[in-house]
Image: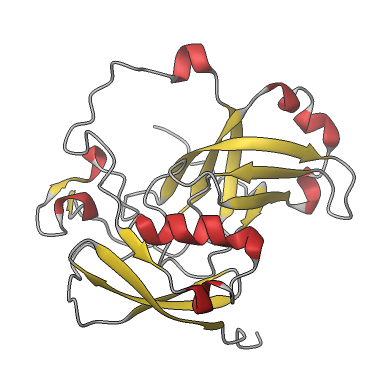
Amino acid sequence: MSAEHEMNVVARIHSDFATKFGIPRQSGLIEALKAEVVFEPEYRNAEALRGMEGFSHIWLIWQFSAAVRQEWSPTVRPPRLGGNVRMGVFATRSPFRPNPIGLSSVRLERVEWDTPQGPVLHVAGADLMDGTPIYDIKPYVPYADCHPDALGGFAPQAPALLQVDFPESLLQKVPAHYRAALREVLANDPRPAYQRDPKRIYGFSFAGMEVRFSVQDTVLKVQTVEPAAPSPAK
């Protein structure tokens, strides 16, 4: 008989995505996306990060906090297959799992040792929503973790990118240091897999902005960029 063990949240990530919409479907696809890993008070111990700076990448083990469900299904509909083909949950990276746990490989840009919140990890390429709880952090070890001859199953390569039509007048509303990342987020097609209506206007929050766009064939056109509405007080 196995004993159950409750996992502790050791950190939370701070990213530019206030909601799930728009988040890249895999980590590492958009290096221009920056985020910070801030440890919970009881884990703000620099000794726990000794040797971390020697690694270029790390693994984040985290909770799909916006997709927690009491029940699970043995099959899910992967967005990669258009959302209309069922595959076994353990053959996918769907958030709807028996245990809502995610795994992301991100680039470790630097460790900021002395902050009011203790040591902070600055990372690139994260696919996590702002505030996502992190259960563990492990170093990425190239000789063991990299498999150049690995097969990709029903997702053998990255999806084709969209062409982004971003009018200059709207681009100027975006702070310069966010422009490259936002363009890449849009090029990676943030729409849900089952929504392909060319007349529909989609929108998502990114870095305090509300970005609305439409997609016709392989061209995404940005329609508006406005300040995001403030979050309701808790």
Q: Is the residue 224 above or below the residue 8 in the image?
A: below
Q: Dividing the picture into quarters, in which one does residue 221 lie? A: bottom left
Q: Residue furthest front?
A: 168
Q: Residue at x 19, y 53 (%)?
A: 76
Q: Residue at x 58, y 63 (%)?
A: 16
Question: Which of the pair 119/32 is nearer the observer?
Answer: 32
Count of labels in the image: 0
Q: Is residue 192 visible?
A: no
**Where's residue 229, x and y in %?**
57, 87
**Where's residue 166, x and y in %?**
42, 69
Q: Residue furthest left?
A: 85
Question: Which of the pair 96/113 is nearer the observer?
Answer: 113
**Where's residue 85, x and y in %?**
9, 53
Looking at the figure, which quarter contains the C terminus? bottom right
Looking at the figure, which quarter contains the N terminus? top left
Q: Residue at x 76, y 31 (%)?
A: 49
Q: Is the residue 92 above or below the residue 127 in the image?
A: above
